Amino acid sequence: MTPSSSHRERVAPERAQAPIRWSRPDAASVALVLLWAGGVVLALLVPAVIVSPSTVTAPHADVWKAFTASIVGSAVMIGAAFGLWLRRRDAAVLLMGAVPAFSCIVGGVVLTAAKLTGT
């Protein structure tokens, strides 16, 4: 009798490594990541709609509205990153979420100064 024609069950050899089990994020973590992404939109897209980045000068009220949107969006990003850090206690999560927020704040300050002075 050949091995292919036998009716014995094939027993898989033991693996040297356990099967990979992918982690599944919980709903609250996914919600915080989506909140962070909403903060990015608020910090970058909304100010660009209020005052076009290509204009040299703009009305002061519009510039301050755009700057306020940048600050609020950055605050949302920092808050979401802090919330994720509280859940995971991983400093990398806090840094990866907060550094782009601080970059948005600095960029908002630079663009506000440029639009108000016309340079």
Image (cartoon, rainbow, N blue to C red):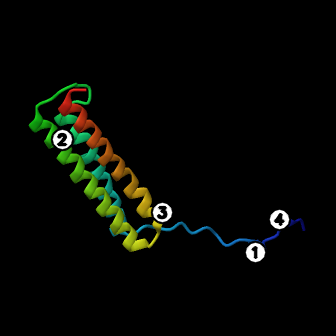
Residue that numbered label 1 is attached to: 14
Q: Quadrant of the C terminus?
A: top left
Q: Earlier in the sequence, mark 4 or mark 1?
A: 4
Question: At label 1, which amino acid type do we have?
Answer: Glu
Element type at mark 3: helix
Q: Is residue 39 above or below residue 61?
A: below
Label 4 and label 1: CA atoms lie apart by 24 Å
Q: Earlier in the sequence, mark 3 or mark 1?
A: 1
Q: Are marks 4 and 3 in contact (CB under 8 Å)?
A: no
Question: At label 2, which amino acid type do we have?
Answer: Ala
Q: How many marks?
A: 4
Label 4 and label 2: CA atoms lie apart by 76 Å
Q: Residue at x 26, y 57 (%)?
A: 75
Q: Is residue 98 left or right of residue 54?
A: right
Q: Are marks 3 and 1 in contact (CB under 8 Å)?
A: no
Element type at mark 4: helix
The disc label shown at residue 92, or none:
3
The disc label shown at residue 66, or none:
2
Label 4 and label 3: CA atoms lie apart by 56 Å
Residue that numbered label 4 is attached to: 5
Q: Residue furthest right?
A: 1
Of circles 4 and 3, the one toward us is 3
Q: Position of residue 51 (x, y in %)?
A: 18, 33
Q: Residue at x 20, y 35 (%)?
A: 49
Q: Residue at x 21, y 41 (%)?
A: 46
Q: Could you classify mark 2 by the number of other residues whose Cα lies within 10 Å: few (under 14), some (14-19), or many (20 or more)?
A: many
Q: Is residue 43 above or below residue 83?
A: above
Relative to the observer, which residue lies in front, 93 or 32?
Answer: 93
Q: Quadrant of the N terminus?
A: bottom right
